[in-house]
Image (spheres, rainbow, N blue to C red):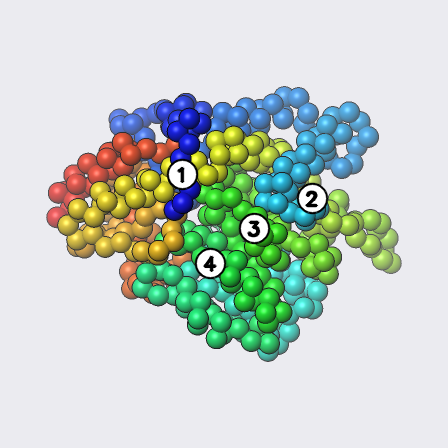
Amino acid sequence: MSISLDTKTFNVEKIREEFPILHQKVNGRPLVYFDNAATTQKPKAVIDAISRYYSTINSNVHRGVHHLSQLATQAMEDSRLTLQKHINARESYEVIFTQGTTDSINLVAIALQRSGLIKSGDEIMVSALEHHSNIVPWQMLCEQSGARLVVIPMNEKGELSVEEYRALLNEKTRLVAFNHISNALGTVNPVKEMVKMAHNVDALTFIDGAQATPHMAVDVQHLDTDFYALSGHKVYGPTGIGVLYGKEDILEKLAPYRGGGEMIESVSFEKTTYAGLPHKFEAGTPHIEGAIVLGTAIDFLNEVGVENIAAHEADLVHYGIERLSSVEGMRFIGEARNRAGLISFVIEGVHPYDVGVLLDKMGIALRTGHHCAQPVMAYYKIPGTLRASFAMYNTRAEIDLMMEGLEKALQMLR
Ligand code: PMP
């Protein structure tokens, strides 16, 4: 990776001080939290902002003329602007607040169906590397519409085959959905190139950015993707909040996902008309404090610097691979040339779950299992992996602790 760490502005010990949860013992040992791909821990800025919201401006948004409602609405719309700037969306109303990546994907799948834009005989393409949330909603759309689900194959290294992808694209392809970074393997996909290829056959593109947004800068206009999704809790923000980015002209063509308050212009029993973007897709009282505090989390991320975070994590991945390579029976799962954020592995003769349980006894949190990517596990013919996934606050010393723990666990299990 060409990104370098600015040691003047990045100090991991200082960063760790910002995360209260890290300073505790688990099972009598200092916590080593390596399950960041599942969810990240929250800095004081985020925790305090939640408390501040409820202590000072809690109110419903977009309805009241009163003071608190105006403040809450302003704070939520300011956060939308922060998100717009962060992903470089052309317009703020192209940023829709959702519950997270899963919700964003369901929104588009259901809205496409409601709008009659997917028909029998059409093709929806997903990659072999996807999280279940970027498979199942498209599969449901296919079942309902009679469209066919087509899969872009992967290779042993955990990379997508761009040539095979090109060959699969055709005039029936309506939408291609793929992740920016795989949560199971850490593969960084060539998304800009993939978007361009999909557009050559007039297909829409949906990028699942759940794992990319914590680790790299994202520019949706540069990528030229039609849709992009992210989850707040993966970028040091609250759970239950996320974003769907969509290009204005396509969002305009989509029917609303959910009906209710806030998404209408006028309602009568004869005919209801809908609000404009983004409110058309934000029915009901939103996750107000989540939406506001997601902006705080993004500010925090940018204060530390996404490039600094990427460089720091690249060092951890490099060091982790180097240390883990010495373990007898080590098999890395996913060795893409371009990868970020995590290391997935299995060890010959031991079950990942047993290793995970023993590591937990030593205060070390790794993820074990299929990581909601069963097709990836099926490709490698394994039930699951052990996954160490990193964040800005992790250190080489923690990797050393993981290694000590792993050696002890293996002695017990072998
Ligand atoms: N896609 C990927 C690549 C993910 O890693 C995750 C979360 N593990 C999701 C989608 C789903 O995100 P959420 O649960 O926040 O909706």
Q: Is residue 356 left or right of residue 41?
A: left
Determine the residue positioned at 45% across, 24% down. Answer: 18
Instruction: Give the mark nearer the N terminus: 4 vs 1.
Output: 1
Determine the residue positioned at 54% across, 56% down. Answer: 207
Say whether marks 2 and 3 touch (CB < 8 Å).
no
> Which of 400/407 is in front?
400
Instruction: Give the mark nearer the N terminus: 2 vs 3.
Output: 2
Identify the amino acid type marked 3: Ala
Specify whether tag 3 is near ligand 1 (CB below 8 Å): yes
Disc 2 marks which residue?
92
Q: Is residue 7 above or below residue 142?
A: above
Q: Secondary structure at mark 2?
A: helix
Mark identifier at residue 4: 1
The x and y percentages for residue 101 are 54, 50
Instruction: Give the mark nearer the N terminus: 3 vs 4.
Output: 4
Determine the residue positioned at 49% across, 74% down. Answer: 168
Q: Is residue 114 left or right of residue 231?
A: right
The x and y percentages for residue 376 are 37, 61
Cα separation, mark 3 vs mark 4, equals 17 Å
